[in-house]
Image (cartoon, rainbow, N blue to C red):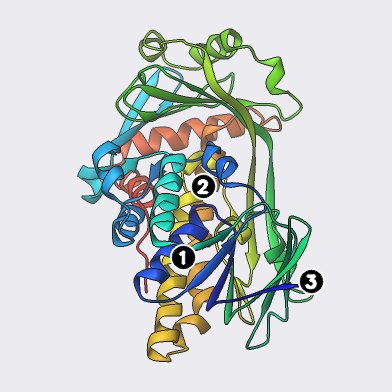
Amino acid sequence: MTKKHKTQVGIVGAGPAGLLLSKLLANVGIESIIIDRQDRAYIEGRIRAGVIESGSVEAIREAGIGERMDSEGLPHDGFDMCFDNVRHRIDLKGLTGQTVMVYGQTELTKDLFEAHAARGTELIFSVTETEIIEAKSDSPLIRFTKDGEAHEIECDYVAGCDGFRGPSRKSIPKNVLKTFERVYPFGWLGLLVDQPPVSQELIYSNHERGFSLCSMRSATRSRYYIQCDMSQKVEDWSDERFFDELEKRLDTQIASLVKRGPSIEKSIVPLRSFVAEPMRYGNLFLAGDAAHVVPPTGAKGLNLAIADVRLLSHALEEKFNKNNDAYIDSYSTRCLSRVWKVERFSWYMSTMLHQFPEHNPFEKRMQWAEFDYIVQSEAASRTIAENYVGLPLKF
């Protein structure tokens, strides 16, 4: 026998996008049920992004879950770009009047789970065989299995917040869905360590040995990345080998400040640019990585997902509370207009800062020329800053 559930919005995916959407909807009286194929401990433990745009900070506060972020997060007024031993600071606050916040996605996810636990939101974990049925009908269904028992959620709308490999995007017919993709010929090897960061702000470096990034999760926890070949394995990299390679890719002053320690987490992440169009099919809406993926170079993945669910929550509020279809009808168009601009920025930063195996000496000189132009031109630095703090969101 199938266990029946009913709600206004069925949300597939209990990552930060799905959790934030549910919280924003709850704030305006709209009910939702969230399902996920993983358990809560696994979702909370995933090490992901740490840089939050100014607009995303607003959304988190708007949702009523910003207290810990405001007390423990690290506001950043700028960041450094470095080519070999030449460093240039992008003054975010001076160029745009805005800042970003360093606050780990893991911590944001914990805050969201706590808020939902206090409210009593229905979350169903460790589900399998999820499928979305009759997405174009007035009552789409989400079917799944939990502990061997069949379940079915009847809802008015489905929000697919289930990531790049989830079932939501696959529910859109192939003759409707268009996808655009660029897979990069390298990845990022990341290491998390309980040691103070080398700088109070992030440092993005292009070196002849490859890209590196010095980041942080707190004043006592550092996050480092180095470009690596995707054929390599985490097991190939001892902590000592990682730090040796990292220091070779940094300018002399910064390299001398690196404090080593045993890694808490180490992983390799592939780099991909991906967009799916449209982001709406009937009463199914895609948000976050279900619809688009960016390389992490511009710190945009989490922020794009937050922008999507802000637009979607507003559109659903207009529909449920004011019977206004205009915003749900334009959701895909409005999202994609911004998504492509953010994809452009992430692609631009990735292209400028990494060593590509196919690049010849001319293309490497073009990277240096681009960096030199940014150093010499306030207008060029402002363009970087405007994109980094986040493009405006038009409701």
For label 1, the residue is 22
Q: CA distance from mark 1 to mark 2?
A: 28 Å
Q: Secondary structure at mark 3?
A: loop
The answer to whether residue 77 of the structure is visible from this angle is: no
Q: Amino acid at mark 3?
A: Lys
In x, y percent, where is residue 314?
40, 75
Determine the residue located farthest toward the bottom in the rendered image: 323
Question: Based on the displayed image, in which of its 4 quarters is residue 20 positioned?
Answer: bottom left
Q: As displayed, is residue 272 above or below residue 155?
A: above
Q: Residue 392's spot in the image, x, y percent?
A: 35, 63
Between the residue at mark 3 and the residue at mark 1, the CA separation in whole angstroms equals 29 Å
Q: Which residue is mark 3?
A: 174
Instruction: Give the residue at mark 2.
Output: 346
The secondary element bearing badge 1 is classed as helix
Q: Earlier in the sequence, mark 3 or mark 1?
A: 1
In-front residue for pair 284/277: 284
Image quadrant containing the N terminus: bottom right
**Alpha carbon separation for disc pair 3 and 2:** 27 Å
**Above or below for 187 versus 209:** below
Q: Secondary structure at mark 2?
A: helix
> Callout 2: few (<14), some (14-19), or many (20+) C-alpha neighbours within 10 Å?
many
In front of the other: 350 or 98 = 98
Badge 1: residue crowd in 10 Å (few <14, some 14–19, many ≥20): many
Mark 3 vs mark 1, foreground winner is 1
Q: Is residue 385 visible?
A: yes
Q: Amino acid at mark 1?
A: Ser
